[in-house]
Structure formats: structure tokens, C-alpha cells
Image: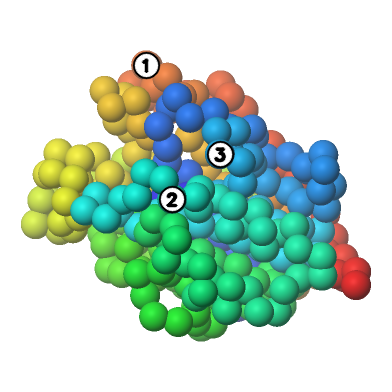
Amino acid sequence: MCLILFALNAHPDYPVVLAANRDEFTKRPAHKAHWWHYFPDILGGIDLEAGGTWLGITRSGRFAAITNVRDLSNINPDAPSRGELTYRFLTQTPPNADFAEHLERKGKLYNGFNMLWGSLAEADVRWYSNYGQSAEQVAVGVHGLSNALLDTPWHKVEKGKTAMTTILRDHTAPNPEHLTAELLAMLQDRTRPDDAQLPNTGVGIEWERQLSSLFIHAPERHYGTRCSTVVLVGKNQTVHFTEQRFTPSFESGVLDTSLGQSAFSFPLLSDMP
């Protein structure tokens, strides 16, 4: 993922609300969100190049998602895939209470990353970055994570947090379809800020401009938002998971949703020992 906006205990009907965009080069193959064949209690997409996933959830509400930290001055081409960290957490049986210790011990082996993980059944989300200090429990409220540390005030993060706050404030009826549609529309915002509001991450001004919007469209670089995901966890312990995919060609110059949408609803179950 390259943008994750999420709210913890900020809505009367949905203790957890998450809206995220996965941005990637168009040539990198991926499998759409589905219940995994070898781990049928896990729902998420799969990176077909290196394995692992950018975002996944289990039937018991265990959740993991990852973003890269953008730092071209510190890239190890031989580092393991960051997606294996989310895979490791999701596939552990029983879940490892010491996962933060694992990240703090092994995190430096990977290129820069942020990881969110925890129990959506309990609205308990943790955050760790190998560019930060120790793992933290995320506080109640609306948060944003892109390619810097949690809640770093990049324009896209601040704009997304403001938009999500407004949507949650105005959407008081427990209608998951309507709320999902509004959040998906929010994630399609291509508005770019003024240059003075751009971060300097070492990629050059033109790249910074193209990467600054919530939805990224960079066809000449064969790069852009490949899918948007919305996850709602109701106070009735029902999960609504929707993935909207976009054509990787980006040839039309407009949003093309021809790759379709997948939607799943399921009750949360207890983790089995």
C-alpha cells in the first residue's frame, strides 16, 4: 500500500474504518483479493512476484498492512520482500503476541517500511517502522500512513484524514454500501498540491508531483494506483471488505474500473488455539 487512512473508535457503528490505495508499477503481477487456497481463513491480495501481501485480514479479525518508506538513498536490492512480514503475521497459528519484538529484531533486514497489524475485532492496531523507534499502539481517532512515518503531515495524508473525518461525521446511518462508496470515491482524488507543499524524498520534483495525490496516475512511468480497498468492521462484529481494481494500462487517461470490484462480508470468529 502507499496510502492507508483509518479510523479507530471514531464512528458509532463502525469501530474500525479503513480506506487504502495500493500504488505499484503496472508490470508487477498480483492476484486480486480472495480467500487464500492454502490458508482459507485469510482474505487479501497476493503479490505474484515476491509472494506475501500488501493488506490482509483473517476471519478472526487479525489484520496486517504495509507501506514502503520512500528513501532512494538507502535501498538494498538484495533485501527480502516486505510483503513477507504481513504474510508471516497473518499465517501464524496461534497469533504471536511478540510480533513487535520480531519486527524490532528483524526490521533492519528490509528496505524501509511501515507496518500496521493487530486485531480489528478489538480495534487494537499497532504500528512499527524500521525508520522509527519501537512499535506503538495506535490511539483512538483518524490516522494516515503513506511513505513516511505514521501521521506525517504530507498533503495527501492530511487531505485524506480530513475527508475521512467529514465522511464519518456526515454518515451516521449504518449503511455499509453507502459508506464504502463514499470512501472509494474519496480514494480516487487526483488533486495535487502546490509545489511548496510537496515533501522532498529524493525522487525529483516531477515524481513528487505525480506521487502527491491520493490516487496516482503516471502512465508514462507505467505506475499508478492499482487497487483501492475499504474495510469496515461493525460493532456487531461483521466485516465488510471491498476491493476496487483499476486497469494497469492507464491508457485512457481516465479511471477505468474494467478490472472489477470484489466485495466480501463475514462475521468475525474467535481465534482457535
Discs 1, 3 touching: Cβ within 8 Å: no
Discs 3, 2 touching: Cβ within 8 Å: no
Where residue 5 appears, as percent x and y from the top left, is 47, 61
Mark 1 → mark 2, Cα distance in angstroms? 33 Å
Q: Is residue 127 left or right of residue 77?
A: right
Query: For the residue labelled by badge 3, is the local secondary structure a helix, a strand or a loop?
Result: loop
Q: Residue furthest front?
A: 78
The residue sitting at 31% across, 50% down in the picture is 75
The quadrant in which residue 201 appears is bottom left
Q: In the rendered structure, which amino acid carries the disc numbered 3?
A: Ala
Where residue 208 appears, as percent x and y from the top left, is 20, 46
**Circle 3 sits on which residue?**
50
Q: Nearer the viewer, mark 1 or mark 2?
A: 2
Indicate which disc, 3 or 2, sits on the residue closer to the N terminus.
3
Where residue 13 appears, as percent x and y from the top left, is 69, 71
Q: Is residue 179 among what the camera can see?
A: no
The residue sitting at 63% across, 74% down in the picture is 99
Q: Nearer the viewer, residue 248 or 253?
A: 248
Query: For the residue labelled by badge 1, is the local secondary structure a helix, a strand or a loop?
Result: loop
**Circle 2 sits on which residue?**
79
Q: Is residue 69 among what the camera can see?
A: yes
Mark 3 → mark 2, Cα distance in angstroms? 11 Å
Mark 1 → mark 3, Cα distance in angstroms? 26 Å
Q: Quadrant of the C terminus?
A: bottom right
Q: Categorize mark 2 by other alpha carbons within 10 Å: few (<14), some (14-19), many (20+).
A: few
**Circle 1 sits on which residue?**
251
